[in-house]
Image (tube, coloured by chain):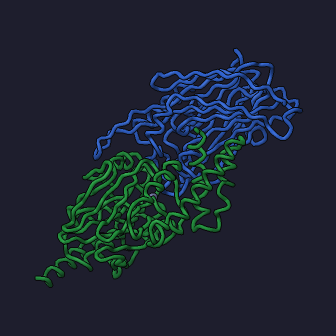
Amino acid sequence: MRILRKFALVLALASLAGRAPSSAGSADALTPLPVTEVAPGTFVFEGAVSLMTRENEGAIANLGFVVGRDAVAVIDSGGSVLEGMRLRAAIRGKTAKPIRYVINTHAHPDHIFGDAAFLQDGAAFVGHQNLPQALAVRGPFYLDAFRPILGDELMRDVKLAPPTQLVQGSAELDLGGRRLTLQTWPTAHTDSDLTVLDQSTGTLFAGDLVFVEHIPIVDGSIRGFLASIDQLAGTEARRVVPGHGPVSAWPEALAGERRYLDQLARDVRALIARGERLETAAQTAAASERSRWKLFEEYNARNATAAFSELEWE
Amino acid sequence: MISSCLRQLCLVAAVAAPICAQAAAPEDDDPWPGLVQDIFQGRPMEDGSRLIVLEAPNRAEDAAVVPVTLRTTLPPGDARYPMSMTLVIDHNPAPMAARFEFGRDSTITALSTRVRVNAYTDVHAVLELSDGKLYVTKKYVKASGGCSAPAAKDAEAAKKRLGQLRFRQFATPPDPQASRTREAQLIIGHPNNSGLQMDQLTHLYIPPSFVNEVRIWRNDEMMLSMEGGISISEDPNIRFTYVAGDEDRIRVEAKDTDGRVFKGEWPSEQPGP
Ligand SMILES: [Zn+2]
């Protein structure tokens, strides 16, 4: 029976691989993602600290899964269907239990482009109550913008579907003797941020409310971001799986991000008070943080731009 | 004519697609000749590189908020004066971002606004001088990295700001006493969204709603007006440089596509200490 199931699985995966992007090469198209068991039954794939590219298959965000007595929950699906399928292969390498939930921590492509890999499982897709609107407004742009970046093959199977289960405030998912607490947040990193606490092991999947080593990205509200992490800091957990960067001790992991966001807000406010232009803020704000973060050049000017147009209203 | 054209473009964009549906444009077909027909009725375009400067970043850092500055650089003694300036973002769903019209004695030499940039695109600035001719210059702007969308970051907050007007006046350094040059900035709280057609999966529908007209007077003299569309960023922002006269107030009136009217009036800060 066990062998049979395995055989059937291989067949199923092989048939998927037939439609899979060939850029990864047919032989290793479904190499399971390398995952670490950070706590019993709690697994994490650590994405590359990089922009999404064809070469890295969009695999830049941290992904996870939690195995309960009855079922499995996936936390974020990756930056391409290929990555999602490789995550699925990693899950199947650890357990044959059904994948009942795919939780999306927010609407960014590196976290959701892999969703379609789990359609075959009949899983519930779980997200913030704002996620449908975020996907409707941004989804078509993401699909178009990433085609030239990731290439047609990696993009072909990407489907953005709204969540089938919405969370407003907090919610619990029961995997059988194992509960996940889901919490939605006011606009911070984005307007659809959701965190997942694996209660039994004290593992907090923070999505992009927490960045470690990778410069934080403000695509929602800098004031909301600062307020949310102050509140998030009160979460009782042992470790955090940030959206990007290594699994870290909690809540110490917040220190760098808080310092950066504080500095950015302080610099931008000073520039606004002096009557400086947005362009100047983009070039100079938070410059003192340059050496402390990876991808600073890629994102700091954008963060300063977003912060400037928000803080101008104070 | 221009205004009906603008409205048409916006309408088409609003009905046809959400704001961000346009692909990052490949270099192949150049929409500019068609845009000259549609927006300027095919009028001839003179080289404007010595009369107008278009400043924009090489890359749109935040696709939803890209600063653009237009400066006129007429040589001293030139008897011509600027009548209008039009900003066109070729590959946006609504390419005609804004048309600014100047009062006869506006004295405006520079103006800045913020726009959405959906894709790799040429941005054109067209200056109409009192000689009746059109002068054009352009700049190529690279789209932002993929996950920066030209969409609202915080729709709820934007809704709360609707109708708020902010007006600031700045003395221009380095020597405000010697010069009567002033800078002023107007921000209009408005989501300025293109609307969202009925989405098959989510059944979300957001009607288009944006600021389409702004007028600025000093005392009773029209200084600057803008006709805008959905390529202008959320919270439309106009910053302009002018020479202060003896006006004692600046007055603003803006309208949106839902017929809302927003008005404000501020005492004019005189230059000098
Ligand atoms: Zn993100």
Residue in front for this viewpoint, B238 or B130: B238
- The residue that appears at 40% across and 54% down in the rendered structure is A193
| Percent position of residue B40, x then y | 60, 31
Image quadrant where one finds the C terminus of chain A: top right
**Residue lying farthest to the top in this orientation:** B220
Where on the picture, by quarter, is residue B171?
top right
Residue in front for this viewpoint, B33 or A179: A179
Please, is residue A40 above or below residue A217 in the view? below
Residue in front for this viewpoint, A31 or A66: A66
Residue in front for this viewpoint, B137 or B69: B69
Please, is residue B133 above or below residue A243 in the view? above
Residue A153 seen in this snapshot: no
In the picture, measured across the screen, residue A194 lies left or right of residue A1, that is: right
Please, is residue A9 above or below residue B152 in the view? below
In the picture, measured across the screen, residue B97 lies left or right of residue A26, that is: right
| Percent position of residue A14, x then y | 25, 76
Please, is residue A314 above or below residue A244 in the view? above
How many numbered marks, from 0 up? 0
| Percent position of residue B214, x then y | 59, 26
Q: Colour of chain A?
A: green
- The residue that appears at 20% across and 61% down in the rendered structure is A122
**Residue lying farthest to the bottom in this orientation:** A3
- The residue that appears at 44% across and 48% down in the rendered structure is A187
In the picture, measured across the screen, residue B33 lies left or right of residue B269, that is: left
In the picture, measured across the screen, residue A93 lies left or right of residue A153, that is: left
Q: Colour of chain B?
A: blue
Image quadrant where one finds the N terminus of chain A: bottom left
